[in-house]
Structures are given as C-alpha cells and as structure tokens.
Image (spheres, grey):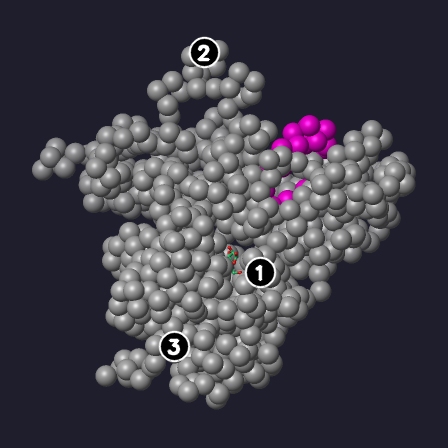
Amino acid sequence: MSRIDDLISTMTLDEKIGQLIMISLGADTIVTGPKAAADPSVADVRAGRCGSVLNLVGRDRIHALQKLAIEETRLGIPLIFGLDVIHGYHTAFPVPLGETAAFRPDVWRESARIAAEEAADDGLHLTFAPMLDLARDPRWGRIIEGPGEDPHVGRMLARAKVEGFQSADLARRDAIAATAKHFVAYGACTAGRDYAAVDISERMLHEAYLPAFEAAVRAGTLAIMPAFIDIAGRPLSGDKGFLTDLVRTKWGWEGIYVSDYDAIGELIAHGVAADFAEAAALALKAGMDIDMQSRAYPEGLKPALERGLIAMDDIDAAVRRVLAAKERLGLFDDPYGRGSVAGGAARPLAARRAAARDAAVVSMVLAKNDGLLPLAKSGGPIALIGHASVKDDEALGSWFALGDMNPITGLADGIRAAFPDRDVIVERGCDLALDGPSPESDDADIARAVEAAKKAEVVLLAIGEPALLTGEAASRTRIRLTGRQEELARAVLATGKPVVLLLGCGRPLTETWLYDAVGAVLITWYLGSEAGAAIGDVVSGARSPSGRLPVSWPRHVGQIPIFYNERPSGRPWAPGEHFTTRWVDSPNTPLWPFGHGLSYTSFEISAPRAPATFRPGESLTVEVDVADVGDRDGATTVFLFLRDRVASTTRPIMELKRFETVDLAVGERRTLRLTLEPEDFFCLGPDMVARAEPGVFDLLVGESADREKLKGIAVTLLDEAAVA
Ligand code: GLC
C-alpha cells in the first residue's frame, strides 16, 4: 500500500475534510477577497481543520506554522503555503500584460524562475499564477494580469510560466507549484464587469479561451484555479463537465483544483445550491479538491455526506489528490526544505535586479515617436512631470506579492541617472485622484508643473492610470486618465514644449487626443523594481524599445470588444461601401493594432517562403528574412499569421500561429525558420471536431496585425484522396 493510501486509511473524517480546506492566515497584511464570516486562525491548523494556507509571508512565520502542523497535529501532515506571486516576490517584474508585450518566452520563464527562488526562500510552495485569461475587453481590470487577446500568446506564456515556476523537478527547494487560473473564459465577463456572467459559444471557448489552459496542463501545472464565473449557466466551481470530463479525463491532467477565494460558497449566490451542503457536494463531485476560504467544505461536507449527496469515496479521491500534490512538492520528505537553504536559494540580488531591469526594458512599447526619442545625453533641462515621477511604488502595479519588496528604482532617480549632464526638474503636477478632481492637488501643483515645462527643453509627462484602479474588482466604464491629469496634460501642452508621454497603465486607455498631441508615446505599464532605471535606459537611447502590444488599442470604449482575429462577416468592411460591417462614427480599426510597437531602428521583413503544397499530416517550414536596416542595433518581433480561406465553418480573418523576437545588429540579416505543425491548420468543424480541411491557406508575416503591412503567400493543403 502506498504511503498515501496508508495515511488515508488512518484518517478520521475531520482530518480528511481538513486537507481539503485552505485558509487565509495573512489577513492582517494581505486581503484578497471578501471578509470571512469567522476569521481563520492558528487554532484551525492545530485542530487539523486546514491542509493549506494562503497569504502568510515571512520565513519565520511560515516555518513556525509548518512546525505546529507537523508536531502538534495527530498525523503531522505538512501544510501547503500559497500566495499570489504574480510578477515577482521580493523583486518586482513588469505586470503580466506588460511583460507579455516583450514577446520573449525566455524572459517570461526567467522572471517566473526568479520569483520562485525568492518565494521558496520564504518557505512558500505554490503561487496562484500564471493567470491565463484571454482578455478582449479592457474595461475589465484584470486584463492587466493576463496574456492579452491572443490564444497562441496565451499558450506560449502558459508553458513558459509553468516551466519557470516549477522547474523540471517540483520537489526542488527553489521550485514552487504553478496554478493556472482562472479556468476558464473569465475575461469574457459581460460588459467587462468583473465577476459577471459569461455567455460565449462553445466554438469560441475551444478556439480562444481553452488553449492556454491546455498548454499549462501539457507543461505539468500542479494546480488549476477555476474561475468565479459561470459559462452559459454553468458555474466553473461546480461543473464536472469542465473540471473532470474535459481537463482530467480528456486532457489527462492529474493535479489539484484550488477554488478561487470563497468561490464554492458562492455557488449559493449563483443559484445552483441552496446551502453549503449542496454547494460542497456540487464542487466535490465536479472534481474540486481544495476550498479556499469559503464555508462550504468546512460546514457543508459532513451534512452532504449525511444527506447522501456525496460518498466517502468522493472525499477520499480528493484527499488522495491533495496528498499526492504534497508528495510531488517533496513535503513529506523535506517539509522544511523551502526556506532552509543557507543564504537562500535565490541568485544574488544584483542578478535578480538586472533581470528585472532587462524585462522592464523589453516590455515597454514605443507606440508613437515623431523623432523626439531618444533624448540627447546633453542639452537643456528636462521637466519630469506627473504622479509616477514622485510615487515610486506605482511601478509595482497591482497584485504585487506582499513579501518585503526590494527597493524600487524610481522614475526621477532613473531619469537623473540616465542624464547626469542635464538638469532634471521634477514636479508631480497633480495627485493620483481615483475619481474626480483631488482636493490635494490644488492649482498650485499644476501651475508649478507648467512653470517647470516653460523652463525645460523637453517634457517627460509621466501620467496614466492609478495602479489601484487596475486588477481585480476594478472594471471601468471609461478607460481614461483620472483626477486632474487631463487638465495637467493640456496645461503642459499649452506651453508648446515638446512632450514625451510616459504612460503608466494596466490596460489600453482611450486618450487619442493626447496621443495625437504629444511627440512620443512610450507605454510603460507598471515595470516593477527597476522601472526608473529601465525607462531611463530607453528614453536616453541606451536601449532601443522593442515591446509590442499584446492587445488591440481601441480609439474609444465604443469599439469594445476589439481584437484582431475576428471572423470575416458576410459583408466585410470595404472603403466607401455603405452596406458593410462598420460604425458610422468610427473606423473599425484600433488606434494601434495587436503587435504594434516601434523601435529606434527599422527592419525589413521579406515575404514568407514555403512549399506551395503540403500533404495532410506533414509539417510546413516557413522561411522569413529579417534585417536591421536602420542605424542602430535593435530587436523586432516577426509574427506569422494564418488565414484559412475556405472551410466548413467561418474562420478568423487571421490567426497568430508563431512569433519570434530577434535581436539584430545594424545591417544584420537573419533567416527565421518557423515550423507549422499539422494541428496548426486544424479547424473545428460544425460537429466541433478538429480536423485539417484541404484547401488554400494564406501565410502572412509582419511586425503587427496591421493587415495592410503584412506580406503573404498562399499554400495548399492537398486533399488526402487526391494525394492517394
Ligand atoms: C482572488 C483572485 C485570485 C487569487 C485569489 C487568492 O479573489 O480571484 O486570482 O489568486 O483570490 O488571493
């Protein structure tokens, strides 16, 4: 009999239920959900009423609680300690949407690896990341946490993050378990309103929202967190079709489900359970293993058993999976391993900060540049104006782990360091009011900022969206500047001085007037611990920007949802045509397309080359030449899109299938070889079965999803019958 079967055979019902409960024990510093009815406590651990803990940080506190669980409970089963280590632990990296803009899987993997080293050093075992929710509606605040709008990017990010967090051996003392979240399609919530119901087609679910999670499963994610929402009336936290039939049975996944915060109890609010017993039964039979911070499992599992809603086997199956996860984490053999490595398992701090700085540089997107950037190393004064110039911790964005964060290199310090021979005048201009004019930022602030602009040769205007207005429970109907920032921007622009906009945001902001009025727009997202240094690197030209937009940037909120890979419509837009799909008061196109981003140099990309025909089951290698034809080194991302011209269902006007970011020296020319596998040509037929349908496909390559700038060739997938 295995250690786990042996253990289960000795466990009482209370001890079994305890293993299925995760409680938040760091609530004094970290609150990530609604207030619980009864605050959990260490007594719950001592009584064996929980098997895992979230939100507790600090090596000594974690060690002490683990020691209590092992020495003061009857069976001494170690706890799992989890936390939202979303974009760094002690060293903060760019927020996920920003880091996605790097289009560099090696950077995505490395930042997760470093975060894992730091978190494991504190004794943590599991992170509630990566967040893999596709988002095509920037009214939804959680767009900041995910991979943007494209399924292929989501797949690549999922793989890189799971590999980075977990490494090749999850029992390593510097590895932490990944949690692919929030399964699934949470980003399609009605009107971008967080937690609202989702109603999408099964086809869209399979084509757009599931791929990233299947990639996380293939990469071996230990945990998955179902989303709060329901899809077409099926709340994920209690749905066997999704959790067991699809993921466990069809995909063959053997990990553990950790519910979202209070999500099982919320099945009552969803209206699919009358009480905690029914909610607990629904979730357990769906395949949900751990109840995070709800009362359903603690108060509902026993009555559910007594009422015959569940059987002991259902409980044992979940307990077995949780204990197997603890075994995979090495907790039975080495329960104090994480947090015990002398000097820590993490690499030297300087190396971590250098990695954070590099990730920040390659995440920035230069959306517009009329030649203003880079600024010269010498010259007249630079006016650095805006909240981000004085509020350094804005650079952490949302969902930064609450470990003791390493110091942040602020924007003012970063700019001063990048321009040692130029006078830098810093003015906050106005406060970061969350809504409406802020009483604190009186006219004097703006007047001082205007005076600074008048004295300056050039203005760096560092404004945007308050980090507090991004992330969870932060949906907005107007995705605009807040407080008196617009007033500040207009006053600074009125001085006539050249202005570079440094836009801090976690989602597209529809300030088209501002982007038109300034000379350059550098999207700086929230870049983390080395934000100031990285922005100094790019503004001074020490590094060339290379980030690309992972989301389409709407001109105004009326265009939302907006994404590049739409289906064509029977009346596709055509210039001058009345009866075509369009608005009468706006172009169909975004202000900036998916993949948009400028460099300080320029590149030439050839048309793709590939065999004109290929057979079913064969892969297809596509060659593309890319050259740096500008006057300095730089990096560009080459996108390869596919267009299935005729199929048994309507196909998106183009679908991203590969991307590659290359660093090139001046004059350097390189040939990329991108190999498409047979499944890249599959489409879901009317019967929802994925298959390759013979016919003509367009291969389109370019530096963004701007259809006008893509170069393409046609290739033909031969008909099997014809080939025979
Ligand atoms: C929150 C979030 C989830 C997070 C969890 C634990 O409500 O939805 O992303 O991991 O609770 O903090």
Residue drawn at 46 percent across, 64 percent down: 295
Residue with the mark numbered 3:
14
Q: Are marks 1 and 3 in contact (CB under 8 Å)?
A: no
Cα distance between the residues tagged 3 and 2: 69 Å
- Whether residue 489 is in magenta: the answer is no
Q: Is mark 1 within 8 Å of ligand 1?
A: no
Label 3 residue SS: helix
Q: Position of residue 639 (x, y in %)?
A: 44, 40
Left or right: 28, with 194 as reference point: right
Tell whether 494 sits left or right of 596.
Answer: right
Q: Residue at x 9, y 37 (%)?
A: 724
Which label number is shown at residue 35? 1
Residue with the mark numbered 2: 577
Which residue is at the front of the view, 514 or 722? 514
Secondary structure state at the residue bearing disc 1: loop
- The image position of residue 95, as x and y in percent, is 58, 53
Q: Residue at x 31, y 38 (%)?
A: 203
Q: Residues within 10 Å of mark 3 (few under 14, many from 20)?
A: some
User: Whole-Å distance between the Cαs marked 1 and 3?
Assistant: 24 Å
The magenta-colored residue range is 503-519
Relative depth, front residue between 478 and 573: 478
Tell me which corner region of the image, top left, top right, bottom left or bottom right, holds residue 298: bottom left
What SS does tag 2 mark? loop
Callout in the foreground (3, 2): 3
N-term mark: 1 or 2:
1
